[in-house]
Image (cartoon, rainbow, N blue to C red):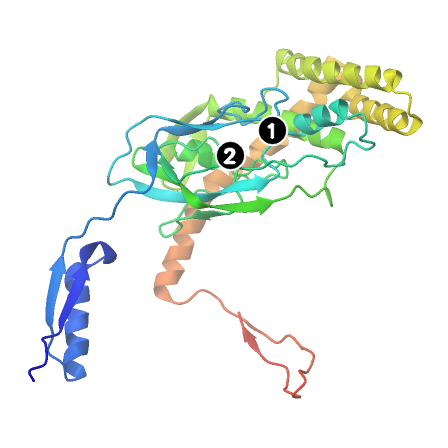
Amino acid sequence: MRQKETIFVIPTHRLRDVAETIEKYDENFWINGHALKIIVFDSHVPKNFETGELIIDTAMDLETNTTKGYFRENSLLLQQGRVLNNANVKIAQTFRTGTNDIDTLDFVHMYLNDENQISPNDLNDFYILTNFRPVITNKNWRMDCGVAGYDNQLGLPPFFPTRLRFEDYIYRLWIQQEGIVAAHVDAVQNHIRNNYMRNPLASELFNEEICSLLKKKIKNSVYHLDDLGIKFDYSGEVTLEDSEEILQKISTIHTQVLKASVSTQNEEPKQSLQLFAANLSRVFYGFEPDFFQQNVSRIIDDVISQFHGSLEIWPTLVEICYFYKDKKDLPQIRVKNKKLKSRNGSKPSEIPA
């Protein structure tokens, strides 16, 4: 009986370099004594994702990602837009459930609307993602995710060096270059806000207001985007109008907290509310505009100086790394960590790092 001819079929969408890969396959077959007919075909992968300009969160401000108010429900909407076929995906991120990317101000509203909640740091509500679909977008203002991956093959901008919890905002600005897109993949991770090692709620609220101010100032002064960073004109000025806008918003919250402390009959929540109101007043410098502006200006000036400094030196650091990488391997050290002997009595192992 004649044996059927074996044919090796290769779909081109699985290959980066078609010609080189086929030669490698053919060489391997010959070495092992085979002479197979190889067929290469151009395959089409069915598109199982949406494309558009950007994702809009109905509960959040688009460009600063700050809350629009207290909402029990929100939706993610895709704004239509054309994505280039040859666009390069530089960021891929999952969706998130458990605790949404809500502001500290939202936690304050939850606290004020729950008469049974004793401490403002308690988390009694959870965000449940009910439906999602993968999508590729030209812009990515909403970088709330469980897990994110970055294509660093040719280098990327540095994260903003800050403890103010908006270090990834640089990528919301940087990704607006033509030909660079973000992917929201078909996956979701559970994420629960953990108050361990966090600042008190009043301090978190202060940090977020500083972050929002910085986002607006930086975004409105960007004048250049390139492969390894961004450039912006903002140098750290804080006007009296900036200060009064923040204080007016927080003063309103402070008044609501005081009213809630007066209306409650339970002594434990009353004391908690009074303490929270006192912390708000202390953290926001007694709501004195001049004093507040003076201290915030100092903080922002330090932060902006670090941003400009890191962005200036970053391309040189990347260049140095690539230079040494091409000459020789980057420095390595063998770590000799002593481990407990296993049950079979094996010796501590050396772990290459």
Q: Residue furthest left?
A: 2
Q: Position of residue 279 (x, y in %)?
A: 81, 26
Query: Badges 1 and 2: C-beta atoms under 8 Å apart?
Result: yes
Image side of residue 242 versus residue 168, left or right = right
The correct choice, above or below, for 12 with respect to 330 in the image is: above
At 41% from the left and 67% from the top, the residue drawn is 329
How many marks overall?
2
Q: Indicate the secondary structure of the residue bearing disc 1.
A: helix
Q: Residue 169: which disc?
A: 2
The correct choice, above or below, for 264 with respect to 332 in the image is: above
At 11% from the left and 68% from the top, the residue drawn is 38
Q: Residue 79: which disc?
A: none
Q: Earlier in the sequence, mark 1 or mark 2?
A: 2
At 60% from the left and 28% from the top, the residue drawn is 211
Give the CA distance from mark 1 to mark 2: 10 Å
Q: Residue furthest right?
A: 267
At 64% from the left and 43% from the top, the residue drawn is 192
Q: Is residue 10 visible?
A: yes
> Residue beneath label 1, please?
211
Q: Residues within 10 Å of mark 1 (few under 14, many from 20)?
A: many
Give the residue type that dot 1 points to: Cys
Q: Position of residue 54 (x, y in %)?
A: 40, 29
Q: Is residue 161 visible?
A: no
Q: Position of residue 316 (x, y in %)?
A: 42, 47
The correct choice, above or below, for 213 with respect to 83 in the image is: above
Give the residue type that dot 2 points to: Tyr
Q: 155 or 24: which is nearer to us?
A: 24
Q: 187 or 204: which is nearer to us?
A: 187
Q: Indicate the secondary structure of the residue bearing disc 2.
A: helix
Image side of residue 313 versus residue 347, left or right = left
